[in-house]
Amino acid sequence: MAGSVNRDNLWQRVAIATPYLWLLLFFLIPFIIILKISLADPVIAQPPFTPTFDEQGALSISLDNFRFLLTDDLYAITYLRSVVIAGIATLLCLALGFPMAYGISRAREQTRGLLLLLIVLPFWISFLLRVYAWMGLMNNHGVINNTLLWLGVIDAPIQMMYTDIAVFVGLVYSYLPFMVLPLYATLERMDLDLVEAAQDLGATRTRAFWDVTWPLSRPGVVAGCMLVFIPAMGEYVIPYLLGGPESLLIGRVLFDEFFVNRDWPLASAVAVVLLLLLVVPIVILQRNQARDAEAAT
Amino acid sequence: MRKTSRFTTSVLAFGYAFLYIPLLLVVVYSFNDSRIATVWGGFSTRWYGALWQNDQVLDAALLSFRVAFTAASMATVLGTMAGLALARFRRFRGRTLFSGMITSPLVMPEVITGLSLLLLFVSLQQLTGWPGQRGFSTITIAHTTFAMAYVAIIVQSRLAAMDESLEEAAMDLGGRPLRVVFDITLPLIAPAMIAGWLLAFTLSLDDLVIASFVSGPGSSTLPMYIFSKVKLGVSPDINALATLIIAIVTIGVLIAWLATRRTRSA
Protein backbone atom coordinates (compact mmCIF):
# COMPACT_ATOMS: atom_id res chain seq x y z
CA MET A 1 0.00 0.00 0.00
CA ALA A 2 2.72 2.44 0.99
CA GLY A 3 4.37 2.01 -2.37
CA SER A 4 1.24 2.92 -4.32
CA VAL A 5 0.58 5.97 -2.17
CA ASN A 6 4.08 7.18 -2.91
CA ARG A 7 3.58 6.58 -6.59
CA ASP A 8 0.33 8.58 -6.58
CA ASN A 9 2.01 11.38 -4.73
CA LEU A 10 4.75 11.23 -7.28
CA TRP A 11 2.22 11.55 -10.13
CA GLN A 12 0.66 14.60 -8.51
CA ARG A 13 4.06 16.15 -8.08
CA VAL A 14 5.02 15.48 -11.69
CA ALA A 15 1.73 16.97 -12.94
CA ILE A 16 2.41 20.15 -11.01
CA ALA A 17 6.17 20.39 -11.35
CA THR A 18 6.53 19.83 -15.11
CA PRO A 19 4.42 22.79 -16.31
CA TYR A 20 5.63 24.80 -13.32
CA LEU A 21 9.30 24.42 -14.19
CA TRP A 22 8.59 25.05 -17.86
CA LEU A 23 6.84 28.33 -17.07
CA LEU A 24 9.52 29.41 -14.62
CA LEU A 25 12.22 28.84 -17.21
CA PHE A 26 10.44 30.12 -20.31
CA PHE A 27 8.10 32.73 -18.88
CA LEU A 28 9.26 34.17 -15.56
CA ILE A 29 13.04 34.11 -16.01
CA PRO A 30 12.84 35.83 -19.43
CA PHE A 31 11.09 38.77 -17.73
CA ILE A 32 13.81 39.00 -15.11
CA ILE A 33 16.32 39.07 -17.96
CA ILE A 34 14.41 41.90 -19.69
CA LEU A 35 14.45 43.85 -16.44
CA LYS A 36 18.16 43.16 -16.00
CA ILE A 37 19.08 44.26 -19.53
CA SER A 38 16.89 47.38 -19.31
CA LEU A 39 19.23 48.49 -16.54
CA ALA A 40 22.38 47.96 -18.62
CA ASP A 41 24.11 50.26 -21.09
CA PRO A 42 24.42 49.49 -24.80
CA VAL A 43 27.92 48.60 -26.04
CA ILE A 44 29.25 47.40 -29.36
CA ALA A 45 29.92 43.81 -28.42
CA GLN A 46 28.33 40.40 -28.46
CA PRO A 47 25.83 40.55 -26.75
CA PRO A 48 25.42 44.32 -27.13
CA PHE A 49 24.96 45.39 -23.51
CA THR A 50 27.09 45.83 -20.40
CA PRO A 51 27.08 43.04 -17.78
CA THR A 52 25.16 43.58 -14.56
CA PHE A 53 28.33 43.04 -12.55
CA ASP A 54 31.62 44.54 -13.74
CA GLU A 55 35.04 42.77 -13.59
CA GLN A 56 35.49 43.70 -9.94
CA GLY A 57 32.13 42.12 -9.17
CA ALA A 58 30.50 45.43 -8.29
CA LEU A 59 26.89 46.03 -9.28
CA SER A 60 26.80 48.16 -12.40
CA ILE A 61 23.31 49.27 -13.30
CA SER A 62 21.91 52.55 -14.54
CA LEU A 63 18.51 54.05 -15.00
CA ASP A 64 19.68 55.95 -18.09
CA ASN A 65 17.33 54.10 -20.44
CA PHE A 66 14.29 54.95 -18.37
CA ARG A 67 15.45 58.51 -17.89
CA PHE A 68 15.83 58.75 -21.66
CA LEU A 69 12.35 57.30 -22.30
CA LEU A 70 10.78 59.81 -19.93
CA THR A 71 12.63 62.87 -21.22
CA ASP A 72 12.69 62.17 -24.95
CA ASP A 73 9.51 63.54 -26.50
CA LEU A 74 9.37 60.93 -29.25
CA TYR A 75 8.84 58.10 -26.77
CA ALA A 76 6.41 59.96 -24.53
CA ILE A 77 4.33 60.89 -27.59
CA THR A 78 4.48 57.36 -28.97
CA TYR A 79 3.24 55.86 -25.70
CA LEU A 80 0.45 58.40 -25.58
CA ARG A 81 -0.46 57.79 -29.23
CA SER A 82 -0.55 54.04 -28.59
CA VAL A 83 -2.93 54.49 -25.65
CA VAL A 84 -5.18 56.83 -27.67
CA ILE A 85 -5.22 54.69 -30.82
CA ALA A 86 -5.79 51.44 -28.90
CA GLY A 87 -8.50 53.20 -26.88
CA ILE A 88 -10.35 54.55 -29.92
CA ALA A 89 -10.07 51.17 -31.67
CA THR A 90 -11.54 49.53 -28.55
CA LEU A 91 -14.51 51.92 -28.54
CA LEU A 92 -15.08 51.35 -32.27
CA CYS A 93 -15.00 47.59 -31.67
CA LEU A 94 -17.53 48.02 -28.87
CA ALA A 95 -19.80 50.20 -31.02
CA LEU A 96 -19.86 47.58 -33.77
CA GLY A 97 -19.50 44.50 -31.58
CA PHE A 98 -22.26 45.20 -29.07
CA PRO A 99 -25.18 45.36 -31.53
CA MET A 100 -23.72 42.32 -33.30
CA ALA A 101 -23.46 40.29 -30.10
CA TYR A 102 -26.93 41.50 -29.12
CA GLY A 103 -28.38 40.48 -32.47
CA ILE A 104 -26.76 37.05 -32.32
CA SER A 105 -27.94 36.40 -28.77
CA ARG A 106 -31.52 37.29 -29.75
CA ALA A 107 -31.52 35.28 -32.98
CA ARG A 108 -33.33 31.98 -33.34
CA GLU A 109 -31.48 28.99 -31.84
CA GLN A 110 -30.80 27.32 -35.16
CA THR A 111 -29.23 30.41 -36.72
CA ARG A 112 -27.34 31.38 -33.58
CA GLY A 113 -24.77 28.61 -33.98
CA LEU A 114 -24.07 29.55 -37.56
CA LEU A 115 -23.79 33.26 -36.76
CA LEU A 116 -21.31 32.52 -33.99
CA LEU A 117 -19.32 30.24 -36.27
CA LEU A 118 -19.06 33.08 -38.78
CA ILE A 119 -17.64 35.31 -36.04
CA VAL A 120 -15.03 32.74 -35.02
CA LEU A 121 -14.05 31.60 -38.52
CA PRO A 122 -11.88 34.63 -39.45
CA PHE A 123 -10.03 34.10 -36.18
CA TRP A 124 -8.76 30.73 -37.48
CA ILE A 125 -7.60 32.28 -40.75
CA SER A 126 -4.15 33.80 -40.59
CA PHE A 127 -4.10 37.18 -38.83
CA LEU A 128 -1.41 38.43 -41.20
CA LEU A 129 -3.45 37.52 -44.28
CA ARG A 130 -6.52 39.26 -42.90
CA VAL A 131 -4.53 42.47 -42.50
CA TYR A 132 -3.09 41.92 -45.97
CA ALA A 133 -6.59 41.65 -47.43
CA TRP A 134 -7.17 45.29 -46.53
CA MET A 135 -4.06 46.41 -48.41
CA GLY A 136 -5.72 45.45 -51.69
CA LEU A 137 -8.91 47.22 -50.65
CA MET A 138 -7.48 50.50 -49.41
CA ASN A 139 -4.73 51.11 -51.96
CA ASN A 140 -4.88 54.24 -54.10
CA HIS A 141 -5.66 51.86 -56.95
CA GLY A 142 -7.46 49.45 -54.66
CA VAL A 143 -10.98 48.14 -54.84
CA ILE A 144 -12.61 50.88 -52.73
CA ASN A 145 -11.06 53.75 -54.68
CA ASN A 146 -11.69 52.09 -58.05
CA THR A 147 -15.33 51.51 -57.16
CA LEU A 148 -15.85 55.08 -55.93
CA LEU A 149 -14.13 56.48 -59.05
CA TRP A 150 -16.24 54.29 -61.28
CA LEU A 151 -19.41 55.39 -59.50
CA GLY A 152 -18.31 59.02 -59.92
CA VAL A 153 -18.47 59.71 -56.18
CA ILE A 154 -14.89 60.98 -56.20
CA ASP A 155 -12.60 62.40 -58.91
CA ALA A 156 -9.28 61.40 -57.44
CA PRO A 157 -8.36 58.43 -55.23
CA ILE A 158 -8.65 59.05 -51.48
CA GLN A 159 -5.46 58.37 -49.57
CA MET A 160 -6.45 55.63 -47.13
CA MET A 161 -3.39 53.42 -46.87
CA TYR A 162 -0.61 54.63 -44.56
CA THR A 163 -2.98 56.76 -42.49
CA ASP A 164 -4.43 56.35 -39.01
CA ILE A 165 -7.77 55.48 -40.60
CA ALA A 166 -6.20 52.39 -42.13
CA VAL A 167 -4.76 51.46 -38.72
CA PHE A 168 -8.21 51.78 -37.11
CA VAL A 169 -9.79 49.66 -39.84
CA GLY A 170 -7.09 47.01 -39.38
CA LEU A 171 -7.41 46.98 -35.59
CA VAL A 172 -11.22 46.82 -35.57
CA TYR A 173 -11.21 44.14 -38.26
CA SER A 174 -8.65 41.96 -36.49
CA TYR A 175 -9.95 42.26 -32.93
CA LEU A 176 -13.72 42.33 -33.50
CA PRO A 177 -14.16 38.62 -32.60
CA PHE A 178 -12.46 39.25 -29.22
CA MET A 179 -15.13 41.84 -28.50
CA VAL A 180 -18.15 39.94 -29.80
CA LEU A 181 -17.50 36.60 -28.06
CA PRO A 182 -17.39 37.74 -24.39
CA LEU A 183 -20.30 40.13 -25.04
CA TYR A 184 -22.32 37.30 -26.53
CA ALA A 185 -21.52 35.08 -23.53
CA THR A 186 -22.97 37.63 -21.08
CA LEU A 187 -25.94 38.63 -23.24
CA GLU A 188 -26.90 35.03 -23.85
CA ARG A 189 -26.88 34.23 -20.13
CA MET A 190 -28.97 37.27 -19.29
CA ASP A 191 -32.43 36.82 -17.82
CA LEU A 192 -34.75 38.29 -20.43
CA ASP A 193 -37.64 38.38 -17.98
CA LEU A 194 -35.99 41.42 -16.42
CA VAL A 195 -36.18 43.36 -19.68
CA GLU A 196 -39.78 42.28 -20.18
CA ALA A 197 -40.63 43.28 -16.62
CA ALA A 198 -39.16 46.74 -17.22
CA GLN A 199 -41.24 47.09 -20.36
CA ASP A 200 -44.37 45.83 -18.65
CA LEU A 201 -43.83 48.49 -16.03
CA GLY A 202 -43.91 51.11 -18.75
CA ALA A 203 -40.28 51.58 -19.77
CA THR A 204 -39.69 52.22 -23.45
CA ARG A 205 -37.40 49.82 -25.34
CA THR A 206 -34.58 52.38 -25.23
CA ARG A 207 -35.08 53.03 -21.52
CA ALA A 208 -35.20 49.29 -20.77
CA PHE A 209 -31.98 48.83 -22.73
CA TRP A 210 -30.03 51.52 -20.86
CA ASP A 211 -31.46 50.71 -17.42
CA VAL A 212 -31.46 46.91 -17.59
CA THR A 213 -29.59 45.35 -20.49
CA TRP A 214 -26.54 47.59 -20.51
CA PRO A 215 -25.71 47.39 -16.74
CA LEU A 216 -26.23 43.62 -16.79
CA SER A 217 -23.83 43.18 -19.70
CA ARG A 218 -20.98 44.96 -17.89
CA PRO A 219 -18.77 41.86 -17.33
CA GLY A 220 -18.85 41.17 -21.07
CA VAL A 221 -18.13 44.80 -21.92
CA VAL A 222 -15.14 44.92 -19.55
CA ALA A 223 -13.72 41.58 -20.78
CA GLY A 224 -14.21 42.50 -24.44
CA CYS A 225 -12.63 45.94 -24.06
CA MET A 226 -9.58 44.60 -22.23
CA LEU A 227 -9.14 41.75 -24.72
CA VAL A 228 -9.05 44.31 -27.53
CA PHE A 229 -7.11 47.09 -25.77
CA ILE A 230 -4.24 45.01 -24.41
CA PRO A 231 -3.05 43.38 -27.67
CA ALA A 232 -3.81 46.56 -29.65
CA MET A 233 -1.34 48.46 -27.43
CA GLY A 234 1.54 46.22 -28.45
CA GLU A 235 0.45 45.70 -32.05
CA TYR A 236 3.27 45.55 -34.60
CA VAL A 237 1.93 44.12 -37.86
CA ILE A 238 -1.04 46.45 -38.40
CA PRO A 239 0.81 49.78 -37.96
CA TYR A 240 3.69 48.39 -40.00
CA LEU A 241 1.60 47.31 -43.00
CA LEU A 242 -1.26 49.82 -42.93
CA GLY A 243 0.06 52.81 -40.96
CA GLY A 244 2.22 55.64 -42.22
CA PRO A 245 5.87 56.12 -41.33
CA GLU A 246 5.02 58.97 -38.97
CA SER A 247 2.21 57.12 -37.21
CA LEU A 248 4.46 55.32 -34.76
CA LEU A 249 3.08 52.89 -32.23
CA ILE A 250 5.04 51.53 -29.33
CA GLY A 251 5.11 47.91 -30.54
CA ARG A 252 6.81 48.97 -33.73
CA VAL A 253 9.24 51.26 -31.88
CA LEU A 254 10.28 48.31 -29.68
CA PHE A 255 10.77 46.08 -32.72
CA ASP A 256 12.83 48.69 -34.58
CA GLU A 257 14.88 49.64 -31.52
CA PHE A 258 15.85 46.00 -31.21
CA PHE A 259 16.34 44.91 -34.82
CA VAL A 260 17.25 48.13 -36.63
CA ASN A 261 19.16 50.12 -34.00
CA ARG A 262 20.33 47.00 -32.13
CA ASP A 263 19.88 48.89 -28.86
CA TRP A 264 18.90 45.93 -26.68
CA PRO A 265 18.86 47.81 -23.35
CA LEU A 266 16.58 50.54 -24.69
CA ALA A 267 14.26 47.98 -26.33
CA SER A 268 14.05 46.17 -22.97
CA ALA A 269 13.25 49.42 -21.18
CA VAL A 270 10.51 50.14 -23.76
CA ALA A 271 9.09 46.68 -22.98
CA VAL A 272 9.23 47.25 -19.20
CA VAL A 273 7.36 50.57 -19.48
CA LEU A 274 4.77 49.04 -21.85
CA LEU A 275 4.21 46.25 -19.34
CA LEU A 276 3.77 48.77 -16.52
CA LEU A 277 1.16 50.61 -18.60
CA LEU A 278 -0.67 47.32 -19.16
CA VAL A 279 -0.62 46.15 -15.53
CA VAL A 280 -3.81 48.08 -14.76
CA PRO A 281 -5.92 46.71 -17.66
CA ILE A 282 -4.56 43.18 -17.06
CA VAL A 283 -5.52 43.30 -13.37
CA ILE A 284 -8.98 44.65 -14.28
CA LEU A 285 -9.43 41.79 -16.75
CA GLN A 286 -8.35 39.08 -14.29
CA ARG A 287 -10.55 40.46 -11.48
CA ASN A 288 -13.47 40.63 -13.90
CA GLN A 289 -12.91 37.03 -15.04
CA ALA A 290 -12.69 35.80 -11.44
CA ARG A 291 -15.94 37.58 -10.51
CA ASP A 292 -17.60 36.27 -13.65
CA ALA A 293 -16.52 32.70 -12.85
CA GLU A 294 -17.92 33.03 -9.33
CA ALA A 295 -21.21 34.38 -10.63
CA ALA A 296 -21.49 31.45 -13.04
CA THR A 297 -21.23 28.78 -10.33
CA MET B 1 -39.39 34.06 -31.84
CA ARG B 2 -38.41 37.40 -30.41
CA LYS B 3 -38.38 40.42 -32.60
CA THR B 4 -35.01 41.88 -33.45
CA SER B 5 -35.09 45.52 -34.40
CA ARG B 6 -34.25 46.72 -37.86
CA PHE B 7 -31.22 48.52 -36.40
CA THR B 8 -29.76 45.29 -34.97
CA THR B 9 -30.35 43.41 -38.19
CA SER B 10 -28.63 46.05 -40.30
CA VAL B 11 -25.64 46.24 -37.94
CA LEU B 12 -25.35 42.45 -38.14
CA ALA B 13 -25.42 42.59 -41.94
CA PHE B 14 -22.84 45.36 -41.97
CA GLY B 15 -20.64 43.51 -39.47
CA TYR B 16 -20.59 40.28 -41.45
CA ALA B 17 -20.00 42.14 -44.72
CA PHE B 18 -17.10 43.94 -43.04
CA LEU B 19 -15.66 40.61 -41.90
CA TYR B 20 -16.04 38.70 -45.14
CA ILE B 21 -15.82 41.07 -48.12
CA PRO B 22 -12.04 41.59 -47.80
CA LEU B 23 -11.46 37.83 -47.68
CA LEU B 24 -13.78 37.26 -50.62
CA LEU B 25 -11.89 39.80 -52.71
CA VAL B 26 -8.56 38.10 -51.96
CA VAL B 27 -10.07 34.85 -53.23
CA VAL B 28 -11.41 36.52 -56.38
CA TYR B 29 -8.14 38.29 -57.18
CA SER B 30 -6.12 35.11 -56.71
CA PHE B 31 -7.61 33.97 -60.04
CA ASN B 32 -6.55 37.19 -61.72
CA ASP B 33 -4.25 36.74 -64.70
CA SER B 34 -2.77 40.24 -64.39
CA ARG B 35 0.55 40.72 -62.59
CA ILE B 36 -0.72 44.02 -61.19
CA ALA B 37 -2.80 42.65 -58.38
CA THR B 38 -5.52 45.31 -58.43
CA VAL B 39 -6.29 45.29 -62.17
CA TRP B 40 -8.47 42.48 -63.49
CA GLY B 41 -6.83 40.76 -66.47
CA GLY B 42 -8.92 37.67 -66.98
CA PHE B 43 -9.31 34.33 -65.22
CA SER B 44 -6.20 32.27 -64.58
CA THR B 45 -4.88 29.70 -62.14
CA ARG B 46 -1.26 30.38 -62.92
CA TRP B 47 -0.41 31.81 -59.50
CA TYR B 48 -1.27 28.48 -57.93
CA GLY B 49 1.16 26.76 -60.27
CA ALA B 50 3.84 29.32 -59.45
CA LEU B 51 3.27 28.68 -55.76
CA TRP B 52 3.90 24.98 -56.18
CA GLN B 53 7.25 25.67 -57.82
CA ASN B 54 8.34 28.18 -55.19
CA ASP B 55 10.83 26.34 -52.94
CA GLN B 56 10.92 29.18 -50.41
CA VAL B 57 7.18 28.86 -49.81
CA LEU B 58 7.33 25.09 -49.52
CA ASP B 59 10.31 25.17 -47.12
CA ALA B 60 8.63 27.82 -44.98
CA ALA B 61 5.34 25.91 -44.94
CA LEU B 62 7.14 22.70 -43.98
CA LEU B 63 8.95 24.41 -41.11
CA SER B 64 5.68 26.01 -39.94
CA PHE B 65 3.86 22.67 -39.93
CA ARG B 66 6.69 20.88 -38.10
CA VAL B 67 6.80 23.62 -35.47
CA ALA B 68 3.00 23.77 -35.13
CA PHE B 69 2.65 19.98 -34.79
CA THR B 70 5.42 19.65 -32.19
CA ALA B 71 4.46 22.77 -30.24
CA ALA B 72 0.74 21.86 -30.18
CA SER B 73 1.53 18.35 -28.91
CA MET B 74 3.91 19.56 -26.21
CA ALA B 75 1.48 22.33 -25.26
CA THR B 76 -1.34 19.79 -24.93
CA VAL B 77 0.68 17.59 -22.55
CA LEU B 78 1.93 20.50 -20.43
CA GLY B 79 -1.35 22.41 -20.59
CA THR B 80 -3.41 19.37 -19.56
CA MET B 81 -1.13 18.79 -16.56
CA ALA B 82 -1.44 22.45 -15.64
CA GLY B 83 -5.23 22.44 -16.08
CA LEU B 84 -5.52 19.31 -13.90
CA ALA B 85 -3.28 20.85 -11.26
CA LEU B 86 -5.36 24.02 -11.15
CA ALA B 87 -8.75 22.33 -11.15
CA ARG B 88 -8.12 19.24 -9.00
CA PHE B 89 -5.17 19.86 -6.68
CA ARG B 90 -6.62 22.58 -4.52
CA ARG B 91 -3.61 23.44 -2.44
CA PHE B 92 0.05 23.31 -3.27
CA ARG B 93 2.98 25.57 -2.64
CA GLY B 94 3.23 28.47 -5.09
CA ARG B 95 -0.29 28.02 -6.49
CA THR B 96 -0.89 31.76 -6.88
CA LEU B 97 2.30 32.24 -8.87
CA PHE B 98 1.43 29.17 -10.94
CA SER B 99 -2.05 30.35 -11.92
CA GLY B 100 -0.67 33.82 -12.60
CA MET B 101 1.98 32.40 -14.93
CA ILE B 102 -0.64 30.27 -16.70
CA THR B 103 -2.99 33.15 -17.50
CA SER B 104 -0.43 35.87 -18.22
CA PRO B 105 0.75 34.62 -21.65
CA LEU B 106 -2.86 34.98 -22.84
CA VAL B 107 -2.77 38.75 -22.49
CA MET B 108 0.92 39.48 -22.99
CA PRO B 109 1.69 41.63 -26.06
CA GLU B 110 3.59 39.51 -28.56
CA VAL B 111 6.51 41.92 -28.84
CA ILE B 112 7.24 41.49 -25.13
CA THR B 113 6.97 37.68 -25.19
CA GLY B 114 9.19 37.53 -28.26
CA LEU B 115 11.82 39.88 -26.90
CA SER B 116 11.94 38.19 -23.50
CA LEU B 117 12.37 34.70 -24.98
CA LEU B 118 15.08 35.83 -27.38
CA LEU B 119 16.99 37.42 -24.51
CA LEU B 120 16.62 34.15 -22.57
CA PHE B 121 17.99 32.10 -25.48
CA VAL B 122 20.92 34.48 -25.90
CA SER B 123 21.72 34.29 -22.18
CA LEU B 124 21.37 30.49 -22.17
CA GLN B 125 23.71 30.25 -25.10
CA GLN B 126 26.34 32.29 -23.27
CA LEU B 127 26.03 30.13 -20.17
CA THR B 128 25.61 26.66 -21.62
CA GLY B 129 26.35 26.85 -25.34
CA TRP B 130 22.74 25.85 -26.10
CA PRO B 131 20.95 26.74 -28.37
CA GLY B 132 23.86 27.02 -30.78
CA GLN B 133 21.51 27.90 -33.61
CA ARG B 134 18.10 29.48 -33.37
CA GLY B 135 15.40 27.95 -35.51
CA PHE B 136 13.08 24.96 -35.17
CA SER B 137 13.83 24.27 -31.51
CA THR B 138 13.64 27.85 -30.25
CA ILE B 139 10.44 28.65 -32.18
CA THR B 140 8.87 25.41 -30.92
CA ILE B 141 9.72 26.25 -27.29
CA ALA B 142 8.31 29.76 -27.67
CA HIS B 143 5.08 28.53 -29.24
CA THR B 144 4.68 25.76 -26.66
CA THR B 145 4.96 28.33 -23.89
CA PHE B 146 2.14 30.60 -25.04
CA ALA B 147 -0.04 27.81 -26.46
CA MET B 148 0.03 25.73 -23.24
CA ALA B 149 -1.75 28.59 -21.51
CA TYR B 150 -4.71 28.25 -23.89
CA VAL B 151 -4.81 24.46 -23.44
CA ALA B 152 -4.64 24.82 -19.66
CA ILE B 153 -7.57 27.27 -19.59
CA ILE B 154 -9.72 25.06 -21.84
CA VAL B 155 -8.95 21.90 -19.82
CA GLN B 156 -9.45 23.69 -16.52
CA SER B 157 -12.84 25.10 -17.46
CA ARG B 158 -13.94 21.69 -18.75
CA LEU B 159 -12.87 20.10 -15.45
CA ALA B 160 -14.59 22.84 -13.46
CA ALA B 161 -17.85 22.23 -15.30
CA MET B 162 -17.52 18.46 -14.89
CA ASP B 163 -19.04 16.44 -12.11
CA GLU B 164 -16.33 15.21 -9.76
CA SER B 165 -18.51 12.36 -8.51
CA LEU B 166 -17.33 9.94 -11.22
CA GLU B 167 -13.75 10.37 -10.14
CA GLU B 168 -14.74 10.16 -6.48
CA ALA B 169 -16.72 6.98 -7.10
CA ALA B 170 -13.74 5.40 -8.83
CA MET B 171 -11.54 6.37 -5.88
CA ASP B 172 -14.07 4.99 -3.39
CA LEU B 173 -14.08 1.73 -5.31
CA GLY B 174 -10.35 1.50 -4.66
CA GLY B 175 -8.95 3.00 -7.84
CA ARG B 176 -5.57 4.60 -7.33
CA PRO B 177 -5.39 8.29 -8.29
CA LEU B 178 -3.10 7.68 -11.25
CA ARG B 179 -5.41 4.94 -12.63
CA VAL B 180 -8.43 7.18 -12.06
CA VAL B 181 -6.76 9.95 -14.04
CA PHE B 182 -6.03 7.69 -16.98
CA ASP B 183 -9.26 5.64 -16.90
CA ILE B 184 -11.80 8.31 -15.96
CA THR B 185 -10.51 11.87 -16.11
CA LEU B 186 -8.54 11.83 -19.35
CA PRO B 187 -11.28 10.20 -21.47
CA LEU B 188 -13.76 12.73 -20.09
CA ILE B 189 -11.59 15.73 -20.93
CA ALA B 190 -10.44 14.35 -24.29
CA PRO B 191 -12.69 16.75 -26.27
CA ALA B 192 -11.15 19.69 -24.40
CA MET B 193 -7.67 18.34 -25.13
CA ILE B 194 -8.46 18.00 -28.83
CA ALA B 195 -9.90 21.51 -28.93
CA GLY B 196 -6.82 22.76 -27.12
CA TRP B 197 -4.48 20.98 -29.54
CA LEU B 198 -6.28 22.46 -32.54
CA LEU B 199 -6.20 25.94 -31.07
CA ALA B 200 -2.50 25.59 -30.21
CA PHE B 201 -1.77 24.32 -33.73
CA THR B 202 -3.58 27.28 -35.32
CA LEU B 203 -1.98 29.84 -33.01
CA SER B 204 1.45 28.46 -33.81
CA LEU B 205 0.81 28.50 -37.57
CA ASP B 206 -0.45 32.07 -37.25
CA ASP B 207 2.36 33.60 -35.22
CA LEU B 208 4.65 36.10 -36.89
CA VAL B 209 6.02 38.40 -34.20
CA ILE B 210 7.30 35.86 -31.67
CA ALA B 211 8.81 33.66 -34.37
CA SER B 212 10.56 36.71 -35.89
CA PHE B 213 12.28 37.33 -32.55
CA VAL B 214 13.36 33.80 -31.70
CA SER B 215 14.30 32.40 -35.12
CA GLY B 216 17.77 32.68 -36.53
CA PRO B 217 19.02 33.44 -40.03
CA GLY B 218 17.94 30.92 -42.63
CA SER B 219 14.87 29.63 -40.82
CA SER B 220 11.69 31.39 -41.90
CA THR B 221 8.22 30.23 -40.98
CA LEU B 222 5.37 30.69 -43.43
CA PRO B 223 4.09 33.93 -41.81
CA MET B 224 7.64 35.29 -41.84
CA TYR B 225 7.90 34.55 -45.55
CA ILE B 226 4.50 36.10 -46.25
CA PHE B 227 5.39 39.18 -44.22
CA SER B 228 8.63 39.70 -46.13
CA LYS B 229 6.64 39.65 -49.39
CA VAL B 230 3.65 41.65 -48.16
CA LYS B 231 5.90 44.48 -46.93
CA LEU B 232 6.51 45.26 -50.60
CA GLY B 233 2.80 45.47 -51.39
CA VAL B 234 -0.04 43.37 -52.77
CA SER B 235 1.12 40.43 -54.88
CA PRO B 236 -0.86 37.82 -56.82
CA ASP B 237 0.98 34.75 -55.54
CA ILE B 238 0.26 35.79 -51.94
CA ASN B 239 -3.42 36.04 -52.97
CA ALA B 240 -3.22 32.44 -54.16
CA LEU B 241 -1.52 31.32 -50.95
CA ALA B 242 -4.10 33.18 -48.86
CA THR B 243 -6.94 31.54 -50.82
CA LEU B 244 -5.51 28.08 -50.14
CA ILE B 245 -5.27 28.84 -46.41
CA ILE B 246 -8.80 30.31 -46.33
CA ALA B 247 -10.15 27.23 -48.13
CA ILE B 248 -8.40 24.73 -45.83
CA VAL B 249 -9.47 26.55 -42.66
CA THR B 250 -13.06 27.01 -43.81
CA ILE B 251 -13.46 23.34 -44.74
CA GLY B 252 -11.82 22.22 -41.50
CA VAL B 253 -13.95 24.46 -39.31
CA LEU B 254 -17.17 23.49 -41.13
CA ILE B 255 -16.43 19.77 -40.70
CA ALA B 256 -15.69 20.29 -37.00
CA TRP B 257 -18.87 22.32 -36.59
CA LEU B 258 -21.09 19.76 -38.32
CA ALA B 259 -19.47 16.96 -36.30
CA THR B 260 -20.08 18.66 -32.95
CA ARG B 261 -23.63 19.56 -33.97
CA ARG B 262 -24.39 15.97 -34.81
CA THR B 263 -22.99 14.63 -31.53
CA ARG B 264 -24.93 17.26 -29.62
CA SER B 265 -28.22 16.48 -31.30
CA ALA B 266 -27.65 12.71 -31.02
Image (cartoon, coloured by chain):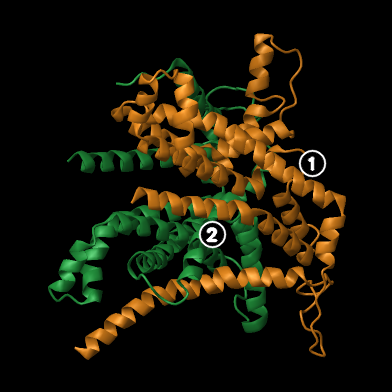
Chain colours: A orange, B green
Could you tell me which quadrant the C terminus of chain B lies in? top left
Please report the residue visible at 51 percent of the width from the left and 54 percent of the height from the top: A287
Q: Residue A131: which disc?
A: none
Please report the residue visible at 68 percent of the width from the left and 33 percent of the height from the top: A166
Q: How many marks?
A: 2
Residue B227 placement (x, y as % from top left): 63, 47
Q: Amino acid at mark 1?
A: Pro
Q: Nearer the viewer, mark 1 or mark 2?
A: 2
* Residue at the disc numbered 2: B105
State the residue lying farthest toward the left: B173
Residue A202 placement (x, y as % from top left): 40, 17
- Judge whether residue B169 can be spotted in this image: yes
Residue A42 placement (x, y as % from top left): 82, 69
Q: Residues within 10 Å of mark 2 (few under 14, many from 20)?
A: some
Q: Secondary structure at mark 1?
A: loop
Front residue of B52/A279: it is A279
Q: Secondary structure at mark 2?
A: helix
Q: Residues within 10 Å of mark 1 (few under 14, many from 20)?
A: few
